[in-house]
Amino acid sequence: MRRALIGSAVVLLLVLASAAAGRGKVDAVRWRALAAGEAESKKAGKPVLYFFTADWCAPCHVLVDQVFADEKAAAAIEKRYVPVVLEDRQREEGSNAAGMEKLARRFDVQGFPTLVVARPGAGKSLRLAGWVGRKRTLDFIDGAAGRLSEMEKESAAKR
């Protein structure tokens, strides 16, 4: 029990240290606001990569540092998706934008960070909750657009 607590404390300290170090890094992804991003998605035919985040969220900063600050990863995101950021402002302002709240309910966002790949207004989506490491996050980003298309084709074939 004691080892587990010490191990958990060490992991937490590493995440916090990495997040603090990453705050100086520049996010290479060109994030869109909700309305503009969804309009662009519909026009371009690309799914949206929704990034649910919060300023106070240490794992969110690690995600930015380890994935979104990387130029190669940012280029891959821009090629496959329309990236939209949705920042939780509940702690800072006492409420969130209505669009953010609606999407958080739709995609059952329970915490931050959460990545969701979906088309605006469509029923199918894929979600990655929490910081799961660079490799697993990049694997999700690399494969989610294709998996979403497969899900959509299967759904259309059943009709």
Image: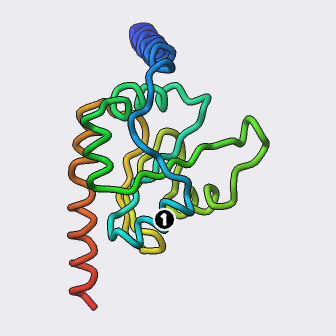
Q: Residue at x 45, y 19 (%)?
A: 22
Mark 1 secondary-structure assignment: helix
Image quadrant in which the N terminus is located: top left
| Front residue of 159 and 96 | 96
| Front residue of 8 and 106 | 106
What colour scheme was applied to this rendering of the protein?
A: rainbow
Instruction: Locate residue 158: give its quadrant.
Output: bottom left
Extreme-bottom residue of the structure = 159
Q: Residue at x 56, y 48 (%)?
A: 86
Instruction: Locate residue 91: give its quadrant.
Output: top right
Q: Relative to residue 49, is residue 41 depicted above or below?
A: below
The spot of residue 6 in percent (x, y) is 44, 8
The spot of residue 99 in percent (x, y) is 63, 61
Does residue 29 appear left or right of residue 146 in this picture?
Answer: right
Residue bearing mark 1: 38
Q: Residue at x 20, y 70 (%)?
A: 150
